[in-house]
Amino acid sequence: MEARKNSVISSENDKPILIDLNYKQNSKPKPVVIFCHGYKGFKDWGAWNMVANAFAKQNFFFVKFNFSHNGGTIENPIDFPDLEAFGNNNYTKELSDLESVINWICSNPEFKDEADLNNITLIGHSRGGGIVSIKASEDSRIKKVVSLAGVSNYASRFPKGEALKKWKETNVYFVQNGRTKQQMPHYFQFYTDFVLNEERLTISRAVKSLSIPHLIIHGDADTSVIIKEANLLHQWNANSHLVVIKDANHVFGVSHPWTEQEIPNHLQQVIDHAIHFLKN
């Protein structure tokens, strides 16, 4: 099994992207799966490395990466040493980063015998579910898309009323990271960039326009992104397939760091459903 950790590629956003590859090196082109982490996430969070291995064992060319402004650095890709970058992240930067990753895979001659570039799937968790839905709707290279505990609406997540006014006045609001206890900044550019690009960043528009196979997986005990959002995604695309994991939370039973040797039951169900979807 080939596992390549922390390759560095350039982005359009002044910061590099760290990327991992997992695949069987056998000179046989394999379907490509590109995974996008969510808000306050990173490619090595929890059991994502175990997920990568599980897909690679099933003959997928699995790619995961850190968004350029997720708060990690080249030296420390885990957690959030660069809060300034985190505060300057936004949805269009994440879409641009994903474009850079797709372009890198598709143009790298090293992978021509290993990666089937006519069979690329995007998988996104939480906020990343919205990113992959939008990108899949606008990039014909994407042949399938999977949303894991994915959000259905970005606009509804911004502060409203007085809180929005205060954010504009101070240029920053902070969200505490429950695990690291860091005060994580969001600069007002996050909101202005959304407003400038609102049509593109409307997930319902993207999902309604999808004509490729679309899988939605969600836990019915998710308190971060409630199951109603999965139902909306499914309504917007009549051809989508919705899988509800009974009693599963937002992270499918995983926490960080994940020190267990086994993948938890709920996440294993996610992997099994996704692989079945991609192979059929």
Image (cartoon, rainbow, N blue to C red):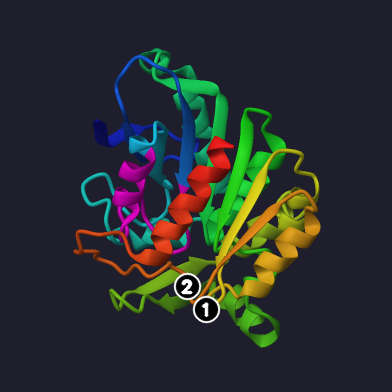
Q: Mark 2 falls on what kind of element?
A: loop
Compared across the picture, whether 44 is left or right of 163 comes to left
Q: Mark 1 falls on what kind of element?
A: loop
The stretch of residues the image draws in magenta is 36-55
Badge 1 amino acid:
Ala
Q: Where residue 252 is drawn, which disc sits there?
A: none
Does the segment drawn in magenta span residue 49?
yes
Asked whether residue 115 is in view, the answer is yes
The answer to whether residue 122 is above or below residue 108 is: below
Badge 2 amino acid:
Ala
- Quadrant hosting residue 191: bottom right
The answer to whether residue 40 is above or below residue 32 is: below
Does the segment drawn in magenta span residue 111?
no
- Quadrant hosting residue 142: top right
Residue at which label 1 appears = 221
> How far across and how far down the image is residue 138, in percent?
71, 37
> How far across and how far down the image is residue 147, in percent?
58, 54
Outermost residue, bottom side = 162
In depth, the one of 107 and 199 nearer the eye is 107
Badge 1: residue crowd in 10 Å (few <14, some 14–19, many ≥20): some
Compared across the picture, whether 127 is left or right of 229 comes to left
In depth, the one of 55 and 180 nearer the eye is 55
Sequence order check: which comes first, mark 2 or mark 1?
1
> How far across and how far down the image is residue 129, in percent?
57, 55
Compared across the picture, whether 242 is left or right of 21 comes to right
Residue for point 43% across, 67% down: 252
- The quarter in which the C terminus is drawn is top right
Residue at which label 2 appears = 248
